[in-house]
Amino acid sequence: MRVVVKVGSSSLTTPDGHLDPDRIGTVVDAVVTVRARGDEVVLVSSGAIAAGLGPLGLPRRPRDLPTQQAAAAVGQRALIAHYSEAFAAAGLVVGQVLLTVDDVTRRSHYRNAHQTFAKLLELGVVPVVNENDTVATSEIRFGDNDRLAALVAHLVHADQLILLSDVDGLYTGHPDLPDSRPIATVRSEADLAGIDVARVGSAVGTGGMVTKLDAARIATAAGIPVRLTSAARAVEAVEGEPVGTLFEPTGKRRGTRLLWLAHASETRGRLLLDAGARRALVDRGASLLAAGIVGVEGDFSAGDPVDVVDPDGAVIARGLVNYDSDELPGMLGRSTAELAAEHGPERERAVIHRDDLILVS
Ligand SMILES: Nc1ncnc2c1ncn2[C@@H]1O[C@H](COP(=O)(O)OP(=O)(O)O)[C@@H](O)[C@H]1O
Ligand SMILES: N[C@@H](CCC(=O)OP(=O)(O)O)C(=O)O
């Protein structure tokens, strides 16, 4: 059994921007509980930015990216030092894994990250994961660790994802409102209809409940059950107690590293297809060639995620494009052979290779 436990900033830090040893202690206890019964665990921990506020004398979470990055550089060090010490007391060794979006998306990075996790777990290490905030730019940032945790759960082939927050589960509306009721089980998207998840979260967290539901959708669609509860109930959650909200799996594990792409909130552009290209992609699982593209929208670089749009205007797929947006207009409608004859073999590549494409409708 392999478990991914994710804990949010608000559950680890005090309002004045320092780590809270008692609250971290509960999370450490939960991880130790999993290990003590012989199971494997990966901890995805937020809190770098929040833990950097106090040492830097910042009164609140900064809005600008450079200050967030500086705070993360300071706070991540404190966070990992604290975990190292706390886990050492239980005889466990900690390994720090800082990931960027690329690491769970681009093929070679993905494989590399998968192998690193496999080796760390084999060696009995507790991987402590966070986004590599100090190098991530706004365009290529998860920003919240909920979706990152879901993608890590998929990457390590986890059997369960546990999301720990400052709230003890999903409610029908904001938990501060008197009419809001807790929800014990979510079996499908239909169970989420009518639930109000205001984007606002705690003062130090990001995304609120919206990103937790995104994470739950990503993981459950890949066959991984998700339990959402408060960090205070972390031990009960790993022991399988029915605390908080359980999101049941809705799909089967998909072998694709592109799972994230179907759920990515931002793409960098759009490729408009003719009817033949639509058929090739949908019916034959083919790569997307320049010959079937009739329009290009947006400003993107090779490797960026783009929407693939059919003649009716529906987004039918997403993919990682192999060319910059300014290279493509001169290629549209042309066959691969023509392009290669004119520009050389580097234009022989498909616009989106089938391995870099995921159908979304
Ligand atoms: N329907 C809802 N059910 C539960 N919590 C909600 C809901 N809508 C908004 N929230 C807010 O989401 C917050 C959790 O998000 P966030 O602060 O980002 O946590 P974390 O730091 O743990 O990732 C809760 O404290 C709660 O105020
Ligand atoms: N990587 C960031 C996490 C951002 C964040 O606040 O996430 P979360 O608290 O999980 O909503 C950090 O460590 O500060």
Image (tube, rainbow, N blue to C red):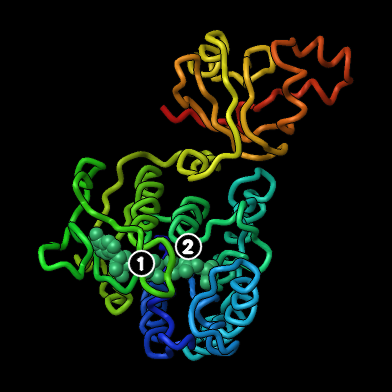
Q: Residue placed at 75% from the left, 24% from the top?
A: 349
Q: Is mark 1 within 8 Å of ligand 1?
A: yes
Residue 48 location, x and y as percent?
54, 76
Viewport quadrant of the C terminus: top left
Q: Judge whether residue 143 can be spotted in this image.
A: yes
- Using the rendered view, name the quadrant where residue 58 is placed: bottom right
Query: Is label 2 in contact with label 1 (beta carbons under 8 Å)?
Result: no
Q: Is residue 183 left or right of residue 306?
A: left
The residue wearing badge 2 is 145
In the figure, 147 relative to 310: above or below?
below
Residue 239 location, x and y as percent?
27, 71
Going by the numbered disc 1, the residue's amino acid type is Gly
Q: Is mark 2 within 8 Å of ligand 2?
A: yes
Going by the numbered disc 2, the residue's amino acid type is Asn
In the figure, 344 relative to 266: above or below?
above
Q: Is residue 348 left or right of residue 358?
A: right
